[in-house]
Image (cartoon, grey):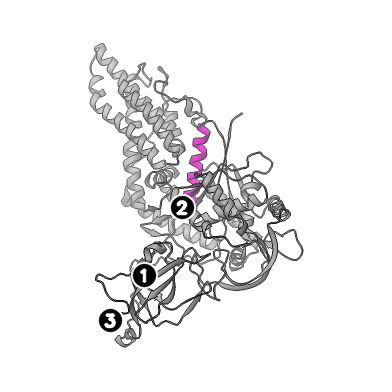
């Protein structure tokens, strides 16, 4: 019996149609599923759609549909997207499926039986966008995660006793250092949990569209208690739980690495083995967002360059786990250099020479010993990189073998050898052709998880029998290409792309797809923001003089409990007593880094309460879109209290 490997993507929220960010995660998961199967695992990939919550209800109303009609439409859109891109999805689960409801309710009852759920009430700010209760904040205060204004809600809730799991979670992270990857994300979660955890509302009474809580009164489950459970409900009764890997974007790490294992601990259920949070996909070095109108869809790229071109670019160009940049220019350049001029060119010239010089029959030879030894090392290194989810490194290593084969062909000059009739030249020609063809075979087997369609085409052109997806890496070694095998019909796999033609075509198709998706969502297509936004209205010198900017010296700093972004500081402004100031800079600066630092403060703002703390002033910082705040600093040592004019 094959060992199982169960992996998941996020359960995608249906308040937006699928875009390249969704595709990035799902393509990576598809590649992992494929290479695990080539390692002999029974690998199963689950994805699906998260269809409940206030945002979905509002989106459905805006589209003029019932929540069920709306979620049917958008869930089908996600399915079509994955089918169009050729992704091997084994289980697609919707949270509106009644079989999922049953698993969510059973999880609740198990947690309740074990004493980790209690009824309470909540009055305060709530972020609709992040489906998040924001305690210790005033009405309209910004959400600590997304910065959008919160709404005030009052309702009875069921609460999960998350506060009881701080020590158990820290023990989990310590005993299983690979539970959260990469290391930077693990450190973020450790810091969050070490500060202490607050109990978590897991139900709502003010909304209708959700799974009913098996308790008195009208309660429906809060979105994360519902959505996370999809990972179990998708494979209920199949013996696949626990998941071996949850593959997610870094923005939802806390829900997966803190809430989800705590829910399972409370229910006495097995925990997933690993959570990997990859970085953001930027568009031309800027974070993609609906408000900017710079979101890119995958299907226009697939229509012009093919799905494998997108797959290869995303997994080769971006170090998996880090933020990465997408641009049409970079996509076309990478395609032409690596696929058209690299693998595609090697395949075309090798197979053309076999047909021309040996009548389409692969010659008998052991191949070049030096290239064969290199191939053995590349096989081992490439598979090791795949296992560590280092896709870019795996492909870079493999392309080193392709480069060596290209160099070898040039050095041997088979076109010259073919013109000679002596035995030594004929043997050298056979060795050259066999070596190049065997490199191609090995490359197809190793690159298949990333570009499955193209690798399979080259595999067939080599005359290989059997499906490449059924090939096992344990059997991959030099010298297995059958001598006397007749190659298949040779055709270009990676025709070169003209950027002056294909980029405008992709952009035009992107506009069409944006309009189509907007109509699907009942919206008007967003207009891209101009590259240079219009300048802000001018103010007079008298208006500027009203702003009291002063130099401040940070005397103390500490994190605000329950708020990842906030620091509470005591700042000396030369007034005799320091001021308390709360600033959203905790993700960029530690408390230790702030103590003793000179900063610029807006000193005459009305005091404001954040998380129950009075902030008597505002610290100045520059925050690039999608980046971290950078404090305004001074080039010379200036006393606290000095005014800026």
Residue 537 pos. (x, y %): 35, 80
| Dominant secondary structure of the residues highlighted in magenta in the image | helix
Residue under the image location 41 percent in, 30 percent down: 380
Residue under the image location 45 percent in, 29 percent down: 460
Tell whether position 28 is magenta.
yes
Tell whether position 296 is magenta.
no
Relative side of 395 to 64, left or right: left
Identify the disc placed on residue 645. Answer: 3
- In the image, residue 415 sits, relative to residue 208, either above or below, namely above
Relative side of 215 to 167, left or right: right
In the image shown, does 426 or 189 lie closer to the viewer? 189
Q: Nearer the viewer, mark 2 or mark 3?
A: 2
**Structural distance between the alpha carbons of marks 2 and 1:** 25 Å
The residue to which callout 1 is attached is 621
Residue 341 pos. (x, y %): 31, 38
The crowd level at tag 3 (other Cα within 10 Å; few <14, some 14-19, many 20+) is: few
Residue under the image location 42 percent in, 61 percent down: 294
What is the magenta range? Answer: 20-38
Earlier sequence position, callout 2 versus callout 3: 2
């Amino acid at each position: 019996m094959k060992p199982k490997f169960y992996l998941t993507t996020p359960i995608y929220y249906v308040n937006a149609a699928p875009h390249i960010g969704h595709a990035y995660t799902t393509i990576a998961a598809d590649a992992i599923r494929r290479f695990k199967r080539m390692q002999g695992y029974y690998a199963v990939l689950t994805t699906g759609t998260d269809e409940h919550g206030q945002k979905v209800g509002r989106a459905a109303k805006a589209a003029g549909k019932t929540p069920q009609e709306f979620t049917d439409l958008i869930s089908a859109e996600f399915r079509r997207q994955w089918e169009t891109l050729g992704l091997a999805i084994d289980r697609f689960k919707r949270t509106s499926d009644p079989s999922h409801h049953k698993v969510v309710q059973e999880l609740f009852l198990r947690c309740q039986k074990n004493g980790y759920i209690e009824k309470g009430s909540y009055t305060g700010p709530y972020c609709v966008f992040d489906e998040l209760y924001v305690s210790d904040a005033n009405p309209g205060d910004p959400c600590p995660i997304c910065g959008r204004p919160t709404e005030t809600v009052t309702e009875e809730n069921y609460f999960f006793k998350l506060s009881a799991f701080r020590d158990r979670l820290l023990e989990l992270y310590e005993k299983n250092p690979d539970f959260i990857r990469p290391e930077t994300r693990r450190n973020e979660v450790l810091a969050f949990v070490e500060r202490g955890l607050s109990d978590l509302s897991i139900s709502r009474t003010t909304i209708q569209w959700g799974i009913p809580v098996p308790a008195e009164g009208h309660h429906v489950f809060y979105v994360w208690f519902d959505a996370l459970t999809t990972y179990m409900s998708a494979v209920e009764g199949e013996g696949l739980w626990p998941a071996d890997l949850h593959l997610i974007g870094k923005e939802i790490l806390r829900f997966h690495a803190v809430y989800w294992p705590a829910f399972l601990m409370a229910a006495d259920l097995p925990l997933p083995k690993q959570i990997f949070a990859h970085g953001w996909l930027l568009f031309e070095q800027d974070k993609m967002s609906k408000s900017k109108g710079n979101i890119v869809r995958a299907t226009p790229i697939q229509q012009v360059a093919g799905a494998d071109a997108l797959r290869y670019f995303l997994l080769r160009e971006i170090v998996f786990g880090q933020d990465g940049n997408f641009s049409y220019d970079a996509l076309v350049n990478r395609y032409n250099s690596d696929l058209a001029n690299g693998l595609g060119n090697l395949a075309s010239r090798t197979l053309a020479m076999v047909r021309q010089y040996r009548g389409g029959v692969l010659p008998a030879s052991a191949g070049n010993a030096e290239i064969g030894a290199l191939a053995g090392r590349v096989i081992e290194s490439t598979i090791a990189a795949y296992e560590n989810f280092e896709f870019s490194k795996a492909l870079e290593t493999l392309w080193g073998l392709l480069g060596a084969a290209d160099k070898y062909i040039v050095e041997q000059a088979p076109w010259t050898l073919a013109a000679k009739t002596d035995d030594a030249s004929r043997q050298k020609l056979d060795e050259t052709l066999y070596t190049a063809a065997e490199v191609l075979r090995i490359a197809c087997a190793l690159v298949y998880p990333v570009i499955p369609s193209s690798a399979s085409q080259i595999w067939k052109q080599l005359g290989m029998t059997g499906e490449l997806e059924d090939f096992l890496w344990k059997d991959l070694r030099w010298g297995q290409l059958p001598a006397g095998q007749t190659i298949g019909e040779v055709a270009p796999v990676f025709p070169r792309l003209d950027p002056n033609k294909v980029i405008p075509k992709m952009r035009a198709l992107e506009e069409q797809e944006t309009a189509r998706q907007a109509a699907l969502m009942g919206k008007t297509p967003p207009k891209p923001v101009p590259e240079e936004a219009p300048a802000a209205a001018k103010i007079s010198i008298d208006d500027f003089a009203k702003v009291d900017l002063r130099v401040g010296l940070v005397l103390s700093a500490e994190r605000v409990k329950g708020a990842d972004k906030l620091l509470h500081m005591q700042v000396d402004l030369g007034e005799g007593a320091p001021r308390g100031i709360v600033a959203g800079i905790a993700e960029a600066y530690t408390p230790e880094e702030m103590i003793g630092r000179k900063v610029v403060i807006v000193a005459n703002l009305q005091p404001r309460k954040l998380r129950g703390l009075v902030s008597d002033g505002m610290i100045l910082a520059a925050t690039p879109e999608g980046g971290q705040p950078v404090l305004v600093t001074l080039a010379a040592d200036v006393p606290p209290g000095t005014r800026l004019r």
